[in-house]
Amino acid sequence: MDRVRRRKHNHQEAADLDVTPFMNLMIVLVPVLLLSMVFTHTTVIDLNFPTGEGSDAAFDPEAVHLEVVVRDDTLQVADGRGGVIKKLPMIDGQHDFAALSLVMQELKRRMPEKQDITVLLEQDTDYQTLVTIMDTVRSYPTVQNLAVVQAELFPVISLGDSPTSAAVAQGASASGAKGGQS
């Protein structure tokens, strides 16, 4: 009987749980998480890689294949048939992306229906240079209706390896001397 009496005396009600600190944490945490979602925007760019079937395909002389060749010391805009449109040397140790944008804008004015361009890179080109080149040839900022918008240039971008300077010079001399055999 003593045990029963002891159990009755030991039984106490549970204390109320104070959730005020947790609610304060949620009040601060939810807006911070919602604000951070705005800054984590990811953009996906569709890329077209060369298939390697170019030499046997029928050649259309009227079609212009724009290329941007990225070298260590220059950016070269070419027509894809060996003709150089513009050669942009480095300025203060950096590629001249502003001049490249102006060249792309002029080419777009001359060929408004053209959508594709090929970016040819040397093997040791760094990633940031690639991204900046792609952004530069894809669009440029312009003002429309008192707002800055991105005007489209050449959004269909293909990537490839740039021919080495020695291979280009050797191929040109061999084709002139041997009738196109290299």
Image (spheres, rainbow, N blue to C red):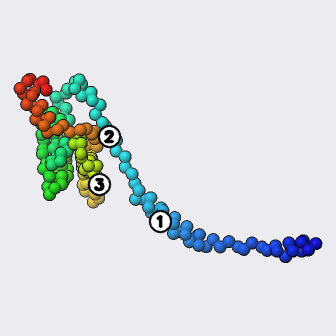
Q: Residues within 10 Å of mark 3 (few under 14, many from 20)?
A: few
| x 7%, y 31%: residue | 173
Q: Are marks 2 and 1 in contact (CB under 8 Å)?
A: no
Which comes before the other along the chain, label 2 or label 1?
1
Q: Is residue 170 above or below residue 95?
A: above
Residue position for label 3: 149
Residue 93 visible in image: yes
Which comes before the other along the chain, label 3 or label 2?
2
What's the distance in space between the residues labelled 3 and 1, CA to CA?
29 Å
Of 93 and 10, nearer the camera is 10
* Picture coordinates of residue 4, whole percent (x, y): 90, 71
Amino acid carrying mark 3 in the image: Val
What's the distance in space between the residues labelled 3 and 2, CA to CA?
23 Å
116 left or right, relative to 36: left
Secondary structure under tag 2 reads: strand
Q: Is residue 26 above or below residue 157?
A: below
Secondary structure under tag 3 reads: strand
Q: Residue furthest right?
A: 1
Secondary structure under tag 1 reads: helix
Residue position for label 2: 47
Q: Residues within 10 Å of mark 2 (few under 14, many from 20)?
A: few
Q: Where residue 32 is drawn, which disc sits there?
A: 1
Amino acid carrying mark 2 in the image: Leu
Asked which quadrant contains residue 146, the reply is bottom left
| Quarter of the figure that contains the N terminus | bottom right
| x 40%, y 59%: residue | 39
Amino acid carrying mark 1 in the image: Val
Q: Nearer the viewer, mark 3 or mark 2?
A: 2
